[in-house]
Image (tube, grey):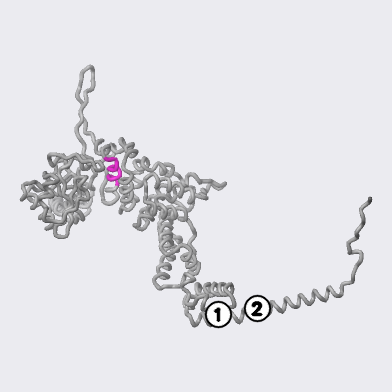
Amino acid sequence: MIILPEQVTKAIDVLEKSGYDAYIVGECVRELLLGSDPQDYDIVTNAGINDILFAFRDYRISDEGMKRGEILVTVVGMIIQISPYRREVVGNRVIYAEDLETDLFRRGFTMNAMAYSPRSGLIDPFGGRASLRPSPEAIEEEEKEEIAELKVPEDPDELTRRKGVTRLPARVIAIGENQTRSVKENGKTVTETWYDMSRCFTSDPSRILQAIRYCSEGEYVIEDKTRDAIRANVSCFEYAEKGKLFSELSRIVMGKYAARVLEQYSDILKFLLPEIEPCIGFDQHSVHHDFDVWTHICKSVGYAVPELPVRFAMLFHDLGKPDCCAIDSRGRGHFKGHGERGRLIAERIMRRLEFPAALSEEISWLVFYHDKEIPESRADLKRLLDALGAEDLRKLIQCEIADSRAKKLDTETPDVQRLRADAAALREILDTGECYNIRQLAITQRELMERRLVTNEQEAEQLINALFDMVLDKPSFNNKLMLLDMAEKSKQRLEEIRAERERIAAEKRAAQALKHKKTPVNRRNEPVYTRKKQ
């Protein structure tokens, strides 16, 4: 049973009382059938744009998407999109339709081509409900039937086996249409009919990635015929909207099942990202890696924290390995410079797909430094924190954790444990406010000069750097009184060193003067001048 929010029911009532049909459609229907709580609701109606505006004249209305035939209406704090039936939407060009089924047909996949209203119930002309997983009620009913059918109801192993066979994951199925053609067979003309799904992808090429995205975000698989149709239309990527491709690819790498999907559908993704093809099946010839390059990349994306720059950095970080591979005399692979090569490949992909500039810059930096050694020493970690900044260092460590976890079957290797310790140390440094930047010292160069602990700026800089190095090793020393005491002792020590140097220099000068006084004058060492011959 589908229960709609009060605001959605009210919006449908407004349209129906005005004499129009109204249905919720698309992903919100699918989510409700799966028992989820949709974030957005779309309503379609046989009313025109002006009719919708008039019906909701007493409500707050936004015409932001009106060029696409979309009106945003705020009903009791909820924004609901209301549209007339549409046959096609390309950019800001809209072709309206006369009936609901035409509007559902354009939605590409059967699971999105369902409509519902409290008055008419579920409308499912393309069998979208059948492609979804059973509802909890259906599962419970199925279990009862299976238990009743078993000769020995107490046999749990048999019930588990039968559940595994009968229950299939949700399937992504493209909406197609019957096509006919005349062919000659044995001298006779025969009409041949087949179900063609190509229009789903040729009308909107981003649906190729959309199908993969559903598998990445949820437990879906692409139905075999739909996958064949996708393979037959991969050339459509050439004229797809770059913004849509970037949006869908972003959602794929951010998905819960991203690692599995990237590996499973690499035969499709390689047409959008041809740079990944050399990595597929490429043996790394390394004792440090149990997987080929592409499998390692896929696993590293799955292990990465769900942050877009980190996920994309993992997708691109080893794309340069095939170009940089060198096999030594022992048959081991080395990939010197693959970070720089990967950065160049990543930048080429991001330019082609029109990534946002700030995101591209961040991803490029992470790819280039993804194999930078993170120090174990807390003091050295703070020096690196000072050089890179907190956010960049945190993301870099997360990249290296994901990279290390994806190298071996045993994900908790010593390298992973060390990097996790570095990540924990970084969090502790930031949370406790430990000094990692010279500006965080409890005293400044000016205070050293005002207290006459130094005589000039150069000495002040040297002393403050020495105190900073001390505080990096011992954070508790970052106390003003303690630092002043150490500075006073340092001043006395510097004066002792200066006096010692002056004494040694004076002794050297005296020794040289005495040596010069005792040395006899040797005329033969003097220059001899001769006149030139005339």
Q: Which mark is residue 105?
A: none
Please give left or right for residue 57 compared with residue 269 in the image: left
Q: Does residue 410 show up?
A: no
Q: Which residues are magenta?
A: 204-212
Q: Nearer the viewer, residue 360 or 471?
A: 360
Name the residue rendered at 76%, 75% in the picture: 508
Q: Which mark is residue 497?
A: 2
Tell whether position 208 is magenta: yes
Q: Given the image, on which type of amino acid does mark 2 rest?
A: Ile
Residue to which mark 1 is pinned: 487
Seen in the picture, residue 11 relative to 84 is either above or below; the reply is: below
Q: Position of residue 322 (x, y in %)?
A: 47, 44
Q: Given the image, on which type of amino acid does mark 1 rest?
A: Ala
Seen in the picture, residue 429 relative to 216 is either above or below; the reply is: below
Q: Position of residue 14 (x, y in %)?
A: 8, 52
User: For residue 172, what is the image quadrant?
Assistant: top left
Q: Does residue 455 show up?
A: yes
Please tell me how many numbered marks the rendered image carries.
2
Please give left or right for residue 25 compared with residue 351 in the image: left
Q: Nearer the viewer, residue 153 or 79?
A: 79
